[in-house]
Image (tube, grey):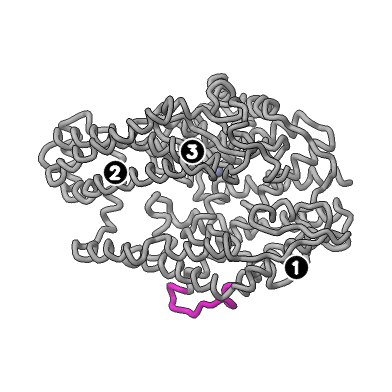
């Protein structure tokens, strides 16, 4: 269905939409809450300069700040979610703007808090926690703040750093990049074997890359890459600015490297990154075997890089939403009845999921909410195995949020991206395993393999390769070595060529420009976390599926921990240590099994 034939938002049946009225019954209630937050903000400013007076004052402040922040977040979530399902609705857009502005005001009102707590001294805070038991829950929070304080500079330096934020906001290099690739970049159309032209754009490229007609795939792939190559100097300019920003931030905060600066705030040792890359390189032969089997399955002489997403079968497996929910419930059954019941109610009576396909809806999928809302999911459900798996993934996030929020106080009611992608991939792993075991028809197995490998290709092949590239480029900036479009592209091509091996044909520049096609490269070492997430997920799923005593309960403890524990600690508690090669090896083991399964089907 093309965008133009999609129904309007107001025509969508209510059961396909999320229950935003569980946050506020209507817009009037939302407005009243917004007003309440605004009038209460000055209450917080009254505490400025007196937080260190007594434990009682500090507690009064944290109670007030929590109450106001929780309400503000409900206001923001309601308005942002309301906008995401109909980007063309001007009233919804205006409310979303008000929601964001409110959060900015709240941030400004609380800005004195952290610096002032750091001045109190951690010895004194520890003493207060003993004297005032209600402060004791802040132990982990204070510990984390202490680690942060080690990288706070003198008042003069901090003042200059804060001033620099105005002309050089952190996302500044990303802005021209985003305008270029989302608005200005023009792509030549793809052409089918019979000469029909098809529009290439950010929203159509994925489906064109998996088009059954090889000519469509080839021309789409090449024309997409060419548009980026035409602007490679401009994009390299802003990309290098982003690397320089990361190095500046690391140095001004006295971290040894930009890699350390990105991992230290979550208390993750840099070995986790290096370990991932090492095991990834060691296991590249598994990918090489996959390309071989895929070439055979497609009956091709040579596998081109544009054949990696070519459909392996023309049978479409239909999976209606209700069916997907039932299968996900079956797959998650080893975690116990309560988990399954919460998930099922979330998808049915509580309407966590906005699954409608309507005009103006944002692309992609996400799970989001706040401490006092349901863990909502936005997606456009398309009745296939890909949608089923996306739903399983997002439900992994939502169940993580659900258990964290119902087990932790507000201060720990969130979690880092590093552990988030473990929970989401865990659900995908469990559901895939269940379906592989129970649905043995070849067409169904093929559809499962196709979905799984497409996912692994993006997150367990492209992303780790980009992580290697990102490391080398940051290191060049750190060493003062030259950097330009040619170096960025040539090195990217070399890394991908090592990863693809002898089994895939490609044009050097076409794979070399991959770095320019991912906005993640503006977010200082973000992408490796997908691969560590997949690894942690498989290691944990393996324990649960093999029936290891207590494994399911330990997993539940992990998703209940929120940020009350550091990410690696929480994972260790569940039984996985990402400083070791074992979990990454395990994920490659699962990948190798799927490749064997495909080989078995292809014969
Ligand atoms: Zn995710």
Badge number at residue 363:
none
Which residue is tagged 1?
Answer: 506
Mark 1 falls on what kind of element?
loop
Quarter assignment of residue 216: bottom right
> Camera-side residue: 335 or 548?
335
- In the image, is residue 178 part of the stretch drawn in magenta? no
Number of marks present in the image shown: 3
- In front of the other: label 1 or label 3? 3
> Camera-side residue: 260 or 388?
388
CA distance separating discs 1 and 2: 51 Å
Which residue is tagged 2?
Answer: 106
Q: Earlier in the sequence, mark 1 or mark 2?
A: 2
Q: Earlier in the sequence, mark 3 or mark 2?
A: 3
**Quadrant showing the N terminus:** top right
Badge number at residue 81:
3
Mark 2 falls on what kind of element?
helix
Residue range corresponding to the magenta coloring:
477-488
The residue at the point 28 percent across, 36 percent down is 37
Where is residue 600 shown, x and y percent of the image?
84, 43
Mark 3 falls on what kind of element?
helix
Above or below, 119 relative to 476: above
The residue at the point 44 percent across, 76 percent down is 479
CA distance separating discs 3 and 2: 20 Å
CA distance separating discs 1 and 3: 41 Å
């Amino acid at each position: 269905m093309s965008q133009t034939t999609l129904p309007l938002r107001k025509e969508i049946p209510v059961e396909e939409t999320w229950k935003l009225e569980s946050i506020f019954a209507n817009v009037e209630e939302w407005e009243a809450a917004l007003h309440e937050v605004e009038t209460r903000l000055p209450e917080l400013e009254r505490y400025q300069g007196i937080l260190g007076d007594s434990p009682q004052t500090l507690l009064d402040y944290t109670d007030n700040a929590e109450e106001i922040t929780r309400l503000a977040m409900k206001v923001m979530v309601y308005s942002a979610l309301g906008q995401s399902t109909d980007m063309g609705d001007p009233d919804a857009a205006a409310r979303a703007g008000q929601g964001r502005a409110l959060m900015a005001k709240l941030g400004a009102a609380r800005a004195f808090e952290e610096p002032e707590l750091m001045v109190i001294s951690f010895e004194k805070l520890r003493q207060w926690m003993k004297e005032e038991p209600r402060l004791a829950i802040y132990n982990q929070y204070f510990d984390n703040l202490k680690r942060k304080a080690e990288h706070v500079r003198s008042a003069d330096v901090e003042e200059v750093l804060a001033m620099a934020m105005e002309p050089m906001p952190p996302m500044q290099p990303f802005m021209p990049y985003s305008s270029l690739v989302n608005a200005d970049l023009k792509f030549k159309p793809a052409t089918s074997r019979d000469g029909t032209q098809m529009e290439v754009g950010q929203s159509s490229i994925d489906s064109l890359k998996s088009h059954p007609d090889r000519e469509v795939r080839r021309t789409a792939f090449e024309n997409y890459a060419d548009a980026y190559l035409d602007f490679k100097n401009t994009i390299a300019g802003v990309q290098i600015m982003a690397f320089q920003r990361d190095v500046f931030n690391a140095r001004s905060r006295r971290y040894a490297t930009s890699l350390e600066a990105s991992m230290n705030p979550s208390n993750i040792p840099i070995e986790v990154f290096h370990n991932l890359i090492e095991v990834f390189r060691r296991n590249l032969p598994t990918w090489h075997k996959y390309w071989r089997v895929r070439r055979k399955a497609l009956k091709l002489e040579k596998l081109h890089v544009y054949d990696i997403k070519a459909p392996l079968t023309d049978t479409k497996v239909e999976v209606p939403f209700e069916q997907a929910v039932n299968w996900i419930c079956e797959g998650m059954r080893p975690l116990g009845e309560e988990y399954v019941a919460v998930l099922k109610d979330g998808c049915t009576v509580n309407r966590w999921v906005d699954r409608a396909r309507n005009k103006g809806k944002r692309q992609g999928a996400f799970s989001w909410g706040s401490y006092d809302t349901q863990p909502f999911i936005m997606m456009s459900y398309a009745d296939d195995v890909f949608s089923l798996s996306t739903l399983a993934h997002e439900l992994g996030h939502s169940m993580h949020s659900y258990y964290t929020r119902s087990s932790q106080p507000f201060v720990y009611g969130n979690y880092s991206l590093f552990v988030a992608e473990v929970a989401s991939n865990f659900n995908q792993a469990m559901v895939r395993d269940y379906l592989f075991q129970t649905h043995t028809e070849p067409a169904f197995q093929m559809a499962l393999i196709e979905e799984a490998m497409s996912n692994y290709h993006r997150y367990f092949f492209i992303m780790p390769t980009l992580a290697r590239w990102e490391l080398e480029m940051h290191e060049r900036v750190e060493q003062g070595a030259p950097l330009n479009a040619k170096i960025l592209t040539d090195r990217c091509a070399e890394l991908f060529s090592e990863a693809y091996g002898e089994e895939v044909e490609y044009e050097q520049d076409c794979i070399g420009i991959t770095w320019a096609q991912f906005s993640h490269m503006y977010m200082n070492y973000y992408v490796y976390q997908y691969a560590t997430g997949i690894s942690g997920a498989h290691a944990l799923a393996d324990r649960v599926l093999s029936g290891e005593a207590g494994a399911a309960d330990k997993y539940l403890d992990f998703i209940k921990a929120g940020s009350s524990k550091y990410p690696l600690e929480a994972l260790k508690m569940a039984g996985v240590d990402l400083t070791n090669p074992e979990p990454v090896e395990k994920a490659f083991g699962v990948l190798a099994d799927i490749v064997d399964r495909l080989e078995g089907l292809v014969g």
